[in-house]
Amino acid sequence: VKNISILPTSVFFGEEAYQQLHIFYHKRYLSNIFILVDSNTREHCLPYLHGRVTFLRKAKIVEVPYGEKEKNIQNCIKIWKEFEKQNSDRKSLLINLGGGVVSDMGGFSASVFKRGISFLNIPTTLLSMVDASIGGKTGIDFNGIKNEIGLFKEAELVLIDLNYLKTLGKRELKSGMAEIFKYGLVADSSFWKEINILSNNLIGRSFIERSIFLKTRMVRIDPKEKFGSRKILNFGHTIGHAIETFFIDRHSPISHGEAIAFGIICESWISWKINCLTEKQYDEISKNISNTYPIKEIDQKTTETLLSFMRNDKKNEVGKICFSLLRTIGDCYYDKKVGDVIIQESLEQLKKFIKNN
Ligand code: NAD
């Protein structure tokens, strides 16, 4: 993997990340510091952070339960109440120590409290290192819809330390890999090739840097998803988010990345059917993704529910479900309106991958 030197100026790795945190602390006159954790990152990540950064031992810890269904307004209220209890003001700082749930919800809570206090992200999952902690999207799920409430606000610093990944389960590591696969598919065919050769070992720093580089390149052109190019990053997410939402309330919720894997297969199939991607390319993508992730069958009733979720997607226009689709591997376009029938068919064809798992 090529060395990438063009990372956002706010993103730092390893030792340098901790140095930057010290500089930040000494440059700012902070009134108080909060660390947002979920129950898992409190156990697995907070002791390590306290060991690395002694001044953070005095910080107030705000804990929320883990999991996507906790990315909600009740937990924001809990965070705001903690801010108030400590007489927080505009010079308060929130550090989000966790995966995408913590950084999305913490970023949102900090950005609207007293019209905005500073926040930093210390991502502790692969997915949040390569995706959720970067690019300024913050928010919560509301009324059964993912990321329904939120705003764009970049973390002032993103501090990446691969040591946090040591306690992360295999399933969560794979979840992050789905977004790495996506970057290759939408923006860099040679990256896609490299990923597939090394697919069990994507957690090295160079893969993470390359992913951040690709994401940042698109976000810089279109930070608020207004002109469109940022929408490319939503490839796999129209169907993927609907599937993730559907499984949130089940006994066995699936990870964000597993849902995106379903989305990538279905949306690659749609890309092929509307004559962009070749059948060979679709086969290559679906084979690699279905070998990495468990694919479940989606029955007719579930398909109806998924379509109703997709109708609520923020990317839609004049009531039509809009997709970002592949032109070829490494090139993606957006705002393609797709009819219900072809979406249903794309979900039905998932069946053929079930035998393989
Ligand atoms: P997550 O935050 O729920 O973390 C996954 C699980 O791993 C949780 O149970 C968590 O407690 C646990 N965990 C986290 N770090 C750990 C560690 N070091 N050791 C042990 N356990 C640990 O989920 P995620 O996959 O990181 O992120 C998914 C969320 O991110 C979704 O809500 C998604 O919508 C959001 N997201 C946001 C963006 C964005 O641009 N803002 C992009 C992609 C995804």
Image (cartoon, helix red, strand yellow):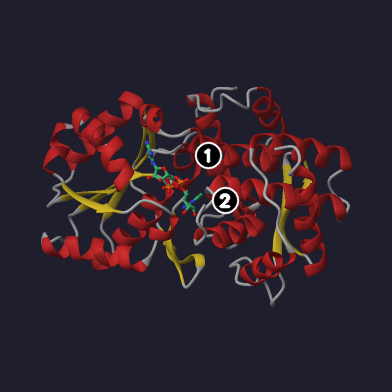
Q: Are marks 1 and 2 in contact (CB under 8 Å)?
A: no
How many dots with numbers? 2
Choose top left, top right, bottom left or bottom right for residue 117: bottom left
Q: Quadrant of residue 237?
A: bottom right
What residue is pinned by disc 2?
221
Residue 329 is labelled as none
Which residue is disc 1 drawn over? 176
State the separation of the CA atoms marked 1 and 2. 24 Å
The percent coordinates of residue 303 (x first, y second) are 71, 65
- Front-most of 150 and 244? 244
The three-letter amino acid code for the residue at tag 2 is Ile
At x 75% / y 57%, what residue is drawn?
Answer: 347
Q: Provide residue 108's location: percent of width, then percent of height.
A: 36, 60
Q: Is residue 57 above or below residue 163?
A: below
Residue at image location 73% in from the left, 47% down from the top: 265
Q: Within 8 Å: ligand 1 and the Cβ of disc 1?
A: yes
Foreground of the two, 9 or 326 = 326
What secondary structure is marked by label 2? helix
Residue drawn at x 78%, y 69% as measured from the top left: 340
Secondary structure beneath label 1: helix
Q: Is residue 108 left or right of residue 57?
A: right
- Using the image, determine if residue 162 lies above or below residue 229: above
Mark 2: give few (<14), some (14-19) or many (20+) Cα within 10 Å: some
Q: Quadrant of the N terminus?
A: top right
Q: Is mark 2 within 8 Å of ligand 1?
A: no
- Give whichever of discs 1 and 2 has the lower sequence position: 1
